[in-house]
Amino acid sequence: MAQTVRPAGSRPATHRTSGARPANGSLFATDGKPHPLQDVLMVVTGVLGVLAFVTAMFHSLHLISSWAGLIGILTGAYGQYISRTTWERFGLIMGIGSSAVGFYLGMAHGGLFGGVLT
C-alpha cells in the first residue's frame, strides 16, 4: 500500500553494455571507485578474526584470542559504519563473526586479564 507507481520515464536509465565489473578501483569495490580505508579495515578485521578463532581452540592462548577478538569486533564495527559496498560489508561480517567466536571462547577460557592480574 505504501508503494507508489512511478510515471514512465521518471527512473534514470542505466546504459551498461556488459555485465562485467569496471576495471578501475579496488578488487572489493563494486562501484568502480577505490575505497582504501574500508579495504584495510576489512583485511585487518579478517586477520584478527582468523587469529582469534584459531587461538581460541587452545586453552592456554586465551589472552591472544580474547584481545584479538575484541579488537577485531571493534575494528569491524567501525568498518561496517563507513562501508560503501556489499562486498565490504560481507567481508566485515565474516571477520566480525570469527572475531566474536574467538573473543567469547577466549573469555570462557580465562578472559582478557586471566592469570596476569591477581
Image: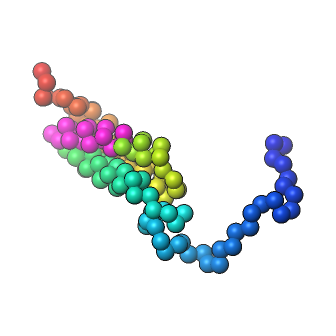
Q: Main secondary structure of the magenta part?
A: helix
> In what quadrant of the picture does the N terminus appear?
top right
Outermost bottom residue = 17
Q: Residue at x 69, y 73 (%)?
A: 15
> Which portion, as a residue range, is magenta?
59-74
User: Is 87 in front, or is 50?
Assistant: 87
Q: Is residue 6 left or right of residue 109?
A: right
User: Is 53 in front, or is 30?
Assistant: 30
Q: Height in image: 20 above or below 62?
A: below
Q: Is residue 22 left or right of residue 58?
A: right
Instruction: Examine the image and state in which quarter residue 107 appears.
Output: top left
Q: How far across and down, in percent of the image, does residue 44 sit? A: 32, 52
Q: How far across and down, in percent of the image, does residue 28 sit? A: 45, 63
Q: How far across and down, in percent of the image, does residue 85 sit? A: 52, 56
* Count of numbered marks: 0
Q: Residue at x 45, y 62 (%)?
A: 34
Q: Residue at x 61, y 78 (%)?
A: 18
Asked if residue 56 is among those painted magenta in the image, a careful observer would answer no
Instruction: Examine the image and state in which quarter residue 112 appears.
Output: top left
Q: Is residue 41 left or right of residue 85?
A: left
| Residue 103 appearing in the image | no
| Residue 48 appearing in the image | yes
Outermost top residue = 118
Q: Height in image: 103 above or below 54?
A: above
Q: Residue at x 22, y 46 (%)?
A: 55
Asked if residue 64 is among those painted magenta in the image, a careful observer would answer yes
> In what quadrant of the picture does the C terminus appear?
top left
